[in-house]
Image (cartoon, helix red, strand yellow):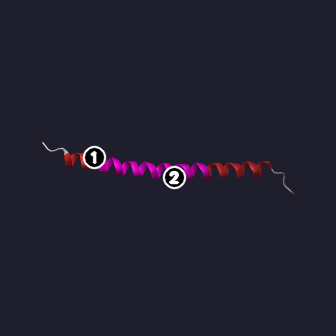
Amino acid sequence: MNFIPERHRIVAKVSQLMALVDALETQLAGSRATAANLLSALVAELTTPSCA
């Protein structure tokens, strides 16, 4: 039996999935940074005395 084609198919799929994981990790880091910035802005807005 020749398992080489199957191995190549598996390696290609794993590579594709790893690229997807990398992209998702990048998006997650961006989302976390955005959430931290929004939280900081909200805290600043709520703790700054108004001029009214």
Residue matched to label 1: 10
Q: Can residue 15 be seen at all in this image of the molecule?
A: yes
Q: Which residue is mark 2?
A: 27
Amino acid type at mark 2: Gln
Dot 2: few (<14), some (14–19), or many (≥20) neighbours within 10 Å? Answer: few
* Residue 30 within the segment the image draws in magenta: yes
| Residue drawn at 31 percent across, 49 percent down | 13
Q: What residue range appears in magenta?
A: 10-33
Main SS of residues in magenta: helix
Q: What residue do we see at 51% from left, 52% from top? A: 27
Q: Residue at x 25, y 49 (%)?
A: 8
Amino acid carrying label 1: it is: Ile
Could you tell me if residue 52 is visible in this image? no
Q: Is 26 part of what is drawn in magenta?
A: yes
Q: Is residue 14 left or right of residue 6?
A: right
Contact (CB < 8 A) between labels 2 and 1? no
The percent position of residue 18, horizontal first and vertical second, equals: 39, 48
